[in-house]
Amino acid sequence: MPITLVLSDDHPLILDGMENLFRLEKDFKVVARCLDGELAFKAVRKHKPDVLVLDIRMPGTDGLSLLRQMKKEKLSTRVVLLTGELDEEELAEAVRLGVRGLVLKEMAPKLLVQCIRQVHAGELWLEKRSVTNALEKLLQREAAQREVAQLLTPREIEIVKQVAAGLRNTEIGKRLFISEGTVKMHLHKIYRKLGVDSRINLTRYAQEKGLV
């Protein structure tokens, strides 16, 4: 049985190149090629391919949004990212969402073939330098969020997020269906627990801990 593929990239030339590449390999079969994330998601649902080759930056539904949809629907297709550039935040999120392989467009085409075979076999293929940085950032963020969860209640964390988003006490109260006085009371406790003394410092803390 050939390895079935859905290819997704917003550049037709890239799609042509990938399709021609896989035609030369007897153990691959391209079942769909897509120019945007929405079409790719529909193709994955329809064909249930073994592997989706995905560009993270596309018009409409981008790669990360597509990965979230796939995770929500528990689709079993494995995903390989093929991208021209890497943002560590995006990569960390992609790894968290279950991406199994990563190949830069600047790499030799044969590496994409090797990557897909390895991912199809249940293994990982990740570009080490970029992924190492992204994983470190992901682990640091998760550790920071666990630290916050030990210090603050879920309600207090929600208020910190609202403050970091620039909302005033009145607006926070309306969103959380509590009085402005209750918001102030929560903030007093939050300031004391975290050792901060202003909304600016609280916002900085939220950014450092990955809450925003």
Image: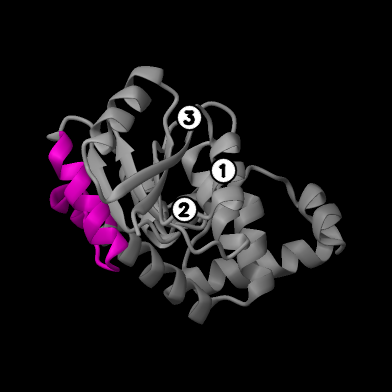
- Provide residue 90's location: percent of width, then percent of height: 39, 45
Q: Quadrant of residue 158?
A: bottom right
Residue depicted at x 45% and y 59%: 97
- Provide residue 88's location: percent of width, then percent of height: 31, 45
Residue depicted at x 31% and y 39%: 82
Q: Quadrant of residue 173?
A: bottom right
Cα–Cα gap, marks 2 and 1: 8 Å
- The disc label shown at residue 43, or none: 1
How busy is the neighbourhood of tag 3: few (under 14 within 10 Å), some, or many (20 plus)? some
Mark 3 residue type: Met
Q: Quick check: 122 above or below 134?
A: below
Residue depicted at x 82% and y 63%: 181
Mark 1 residue type: Ala
Query: Which residue is nearer to you in this view: 9 or 206?
Result: 9
Residue depicted at x 28% and y 28%: 20
> Closer to us: mark 1 or mark 3?
1
Query: Which residue is nearer to you in this view: 14 or 102?
Result: 14
Q: Are marks 2 and 1 in contact (CB under 8 Å)?
A: yes
* Horizontal side, residue 166 vs residue 58: left or right: right
Q: Secondary structure at mark 1?
A: helix
- Provide residue 116's location: percent of width, then percent of height: 27, 52
> Closer to us: mark 2 or mark 3?
2
Residue 126: within the magenta? yes
Query: Which residue is tagged 2?
Result: 49
Cα–Cα gap, marks 1 and 3: 16 Å
Q: Are marks 2 and 3 in contact (CB under 8 Å)?
A: no
- The disc label shown at residue 58, or none: 3
Mark 2 residue type: Pro
Q: Quadrant of the N terminus?
A: bottom left
